[in-house]
Structures are given as structure tokens and as C-alpha cells.
Image (spheres, helix red, strand yellow):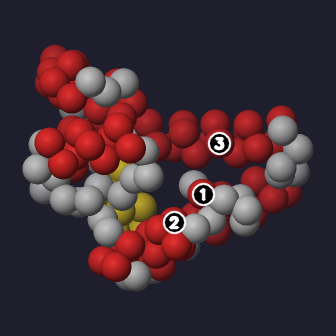
Amino acid sequence: MNWCFKDEADAYSVAVLEHLGTATAIVPTIWSYEVVNVLRIGEKLGRLCGDESGEFLEYLRQFSIVAAELPPRLDQLLVVARRYGLTSYDAAYLDLAIREGVPIATRDSGLRAAAREARVDLLAAEAAA
């Protein structure tokens, strides 16, 4: 979501965005709520207006972003959250990457450390570009 705000875009977020132009992203169902939350907070802080949020949502529609069909079993999600010291939200991303055998794209240091510990590949800026 860093590329939603021009002053927060960096080489990694731009590389992930470019990667989305040629790849399909698999996201947990919570991703949709997180997108809306980022936009709403941006609006509350005066960083976005309603039209800009709508434009960003339209922009996202051009990418192949697929919500995982099956949510994780709650007991399995709890195991992942405990084992790697994650919030349930971050555990949802890690659990999905583990289940699907796909790399994870994140700037969150805790989630990156958990992914390394779980032997989940991290989408590197070079791979994303």
C-alpha cells in the first residue's frame, strides 16, 4: 500500500507494484479490509480525498489479485500466530504463503523475520522488478 501515497513509495514498493503487472498475487481475505482501512485513515489524516481513494481502488482492479478461496482453519492460524509471535492478521499472510508455497511481499520486519524462520521466500526487490 506504500504506493498509494507518493511520499511513501520506495524502491521495494515500486518493485512489488511492477511485479504485480506480470504476476498474480494471492492474498488472505483480510487484505480487502486492510486496503479500505489504509484509505480511510489516509482520508481522515487529509492525505487523500474520497475521489483519490476511489481512483486507487480502480487502479488496484487492473492487477491480478486473488483472495484465497479457503480461509485457514482457526486452530492452524492460532498455531502460526503463536509459533512466530505474530498478530492474527500477519499470521494470515504467513499461513497463506506456507499453504500456497509462494513468496511473501512485505516491508513489516516482524513478518519478514517470521517468514525467514518458516522458510518462506521473501519477494526481493530484484525479483519483484
User: In the rendered structure, which disc, 2 or 1, sits on the residue that comes first in sequence?
Assistant: 1
Q: Which residue has dot 1 on it?
A: 2
Q: Is disc 2 in contact with disc 1, using a CB cutoff of under 8 Å?
A: yes
Query: Does 28 sit left or right of 36 as displayed?
Result: left
Whole-percent x and y of residue 42? 76, 44
Pointer 2 local density, CA inside 10 Å: few below 14, some 14–19, many at least 20: many
Indicate the secondary structure of the residue bearing disc 2.
helix
Q: Which mark is residue 40?
A: none
User: Would residue 66 be visible to someone looking at this image?
Assistant: no
Q: Is disc 1 in contact with disc 3, using a CB cutoff of under 8 Å?
A: no
Q: Which residue has dot 3 on it?
A: 38
Look at the picture and state if 115 lies above or below 41. Answer: below
Q: Nearer the viewer, residue 57 or 8?
A: 8
Residue drawn where x is 88% and y is 44% of the image: 46
Query: Does 69 sit left or right of 27 as displayed?
Result: left
Residue drawn where x is 36% and y is 50% of the image: 27
Whole-percent x and y of residue 116? 18, 48
Quarter of the picture containing the N terminus is bottom right
User: Would residue 40 be visible to someone looking at this image?
Assistant: yes
Q: Nearer the viewer, residue 97 or 2?
A: 2
Residue drawn where x is 31% and y is 47% of the image: 112
Q: Amino acid at mark 2?
A: Ser
Q: How many angstroms separate mark 1 from mark 3 (CA)?
A: 10 Å
Q: Amino acid at mark 1?
A: Asn
Residue 26: name its quadrant: bottom left
Q: Amino acid at mark 3?
A: Val
Q: Which mark is residue 13?
A: 2
Indicate the secondary structure of the residue bearing disc 1.
helix
Indicate the secondary structure of the residue bearing disc 3.
helix
Look at the picture and state if 74 lies above or below 34. Answer: above
